[in-house]
Amino acid sequence: MRILCLPGAYGSADKFQVQLAPLVKELTEDGTATFHFIHGPCKAVPPDGFEEYFGQPPYFRFIEPDKSVDKTKQDDILARIRDFPDCETPEDTMRELMREGIATTHRSTDNALKYLLKVMKEQGPFDAIIGYSEGATVAATLLLHEQRRFRKKRIPPMFKYAIFFAGWPPMDPDRHTVILSDESDDMIEIPTCHIIGSLDPYVHGSMALYNVCDPDTAYIFDHAKGHTLPRDKDTVKELGDVVRAAIQEYGIY
């Protein structure tokens, strides 16, 4: 199984390869998978006070406020998460967080999809996709784009499996909204694995993503920590077994 890997905001292909190294080792040593790492097309600058948190530059993102938008009207979603709401349901939490919409990222989202489709054409094919944080949101958006494209143009989707680490629900670039399960019939139809941390302050985002996936083939894996990737040996081995079981069950090769 060949996997395309998308890092979080202010990450890079090299940094994500280090973050994901335990799982890469677990799944490559027995020939289960190979991994292809990329990063977003937008060069980025971390917010003040967070430079050391994201390591050394360069930094990249997939989504950013459109540069053509009046700077006084820009509203970067990553600036809002410092005061992340905690509502009754994951969907209510995302609605409160996204109450200003995502209109200022419309062009950037469209460019991210075009960039990923180009990567798929030139560096693929891939059997599965992994996304962490912003990368998970973009991966989910790409999967829905593939499904819509198949319905309209009969172009078969490339990905057969997705692994989301601490992601948020996908975006609908046509409507400038986030897709939520209690507002939309859109659903990610391929099997998915959702690695969440019960101590993650943004766990409602992860659950809102889970809720827009097919409940019959969506699997939750809780590593019981925060907004991080699991690295301890026992947890990674357990996660590797989950992925291997999915490959066998759904015939992902």
Image: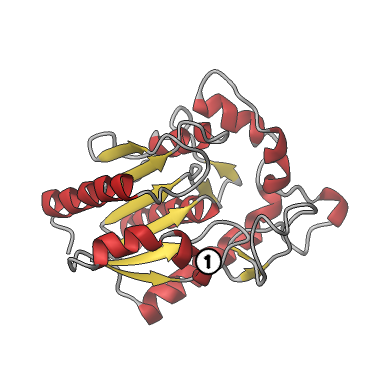
Q: Residue furthest right?
A: 72
Q: Secondary structure at mark 1?
A: helix
Q: Looking at the image, which residue is at 76% across and 64% down?
A: 67
Which residue lies under the disc numbered 1?
A: 15
In the picture provided, is 99 more to the left or to the right than 138?
A: right
Question: From what the image shows, is residue 18 above or below residue 180?
Answer: below
In the picture, which quadrant includes the N terminus? bottom left
Q: How many marks?
A: 1
Q: Looking at the image, which residue is at 36% across and 59% down?
A: 22
- Residue 133 at x, y percent in the picture: 52, 50
Q: Nearer the viewer, residue 15 or 176?
A: 15
Q: Is residue 81 visible?
A: yes
Which residue type does callout 1 highlight? Lys
- Residue 65 at x, y percent in the picture: 71, 57
Q: Looking at the image, which residue is at 22% across and 67% down?
A: 29
Q: Quadrant of residue 30?
A: bottom left
- Residue 157 at x, y percent in the picture: 30, 62
Q: Looking at the image, which residue is at 66% across and 68% down?
A: 56
- Residue 236 at x, y percent in the picture: 31, 50
Q: Nearer the viewer, residue 204 or 14?
A: 14
Q: Residue furthest top?
A: 88
Q: Nearer the viewer, residue 72 or 163?
A: 163
In the picture provided, is 225 more to the left or to the right than 64?
A: left
